Image (cartoon, grey):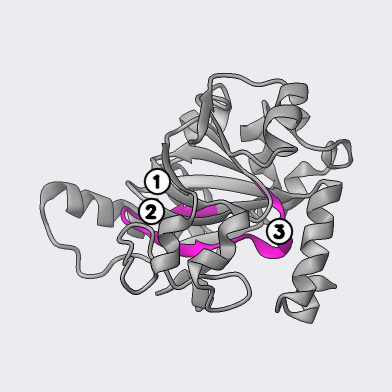
Amino acid sequence: MISIVENIDKHSFYRDYVKPGRPLVVKGGISDMPAVQKWNNAYFKDLGTSVSLPIKTGDVSKGEKVMMSLSAYAAQLETYERELASGVKPAEKPAYLHDVPIFHIMPHLKEDVSSFPVSLFPSWYKDNWWKFVQFFMGPSNSLTPLHFDTLCTHNLFFQISGSKRFYMVAARDRDKCYLKSWRSAKVDLEHPDFDQFPLLREAQRDDVVIDPGDILFMPSGTLHQVRGLSASISFKIDWHTNPSVLAGLMSGFQGAPAKNVF
């Protein structure tokens, strides 16, 4: 069962969740962040005229990309969501802006996250936390298949706009998820097929919806599958503690590519 709290201090966070490897949602944990009020399709449509970003097409796990200006992509999302809301079947579903280091590309956006909860991270991330941010922006019904994060990092996920449902499996139950590569799985947690994948019944499975202003913590190695319940904007930081560094290094003996281990 995923714990849900309204606030958390650093000591309690590490004692009760990071060290024992328990997932956590902090409801409204960043609700006072300016980005939660400002960031939407219209905002980025006006802001990103000259900035081109890699947009993932099709199955995001395959990493196929096209380059598109942020302004054009935001306008495409805006049109798509408007057509959905009016009952018109859109001609094509937009691709998914996924895992983009947004503050390297558009550093002025750091002004919109001025109340960032840096205290939740180890001290060596304190001044450079923004360098590790990966940005997500996508349409309703976007899907990221079941996987765990590269090199078994912890994951703090910050929901800015829209809602997402996370389906999770504890790291210790990885072998019950029928991995098809070193970090992605065959099973679909939205529609589990226990006849084809019987070990999945024994796995600790959880799911939770996160809304604008929420923070989700996923411990090192947690497998997760993500469904966009609406048009959505969010970002995450993958980060390490000493034990998770060791887990990441061990992944080198479990099929991780040499470049990732390096």
**Quarter of the image holding residue 261?**
bottom right
Q: Which residue in the rendered view is the most extreme toward the left?
A: 87
Viewer-proximal residue among 215 and 22: 22
Q: Label 3 neighbourhood size at 10 Å, few (<14), some (14-19), many (20+)?
A: many
Nearer to the camera, 238 or 203: 203
Could you say which disc has been placed on residue 152 in the image? 3
> Is 53 covered by the magenta stretch?
no
Marks 2/3: CA distance? 21 Å
The amino acid sitting under disc 1 is Arg
Pointer 1 or 2: first along the chain: 1
Residue receiving disc 1? 165
207 or 160, which is in the foreground? 207
Q: Which residue is tagged 2? A: 227
Residue 47 place in picture, x, y as percent? 52, 48
SS for dot 2: strand
SS for tag 1? strand
What is the spatial separation of the Cα atoms under label 1 and label 2, in whole angstroms?
5 Å
Determine the residue positioned at 61% across, 59% down: 100
Q: Residues within 10 Å of mark 1 (few under 14, many from 20)?
A: some
Q: Secondary structure at mark 3?
A: helix
Asked whether the viewer can see residue 53, the reply is no
Q: Is residue 82 left or right of residue 186?
A: left
Q: Are marks 1 and 2 in contact (CB under 8 Å)?
A: yes
Amino acid type, mark 3: Cys
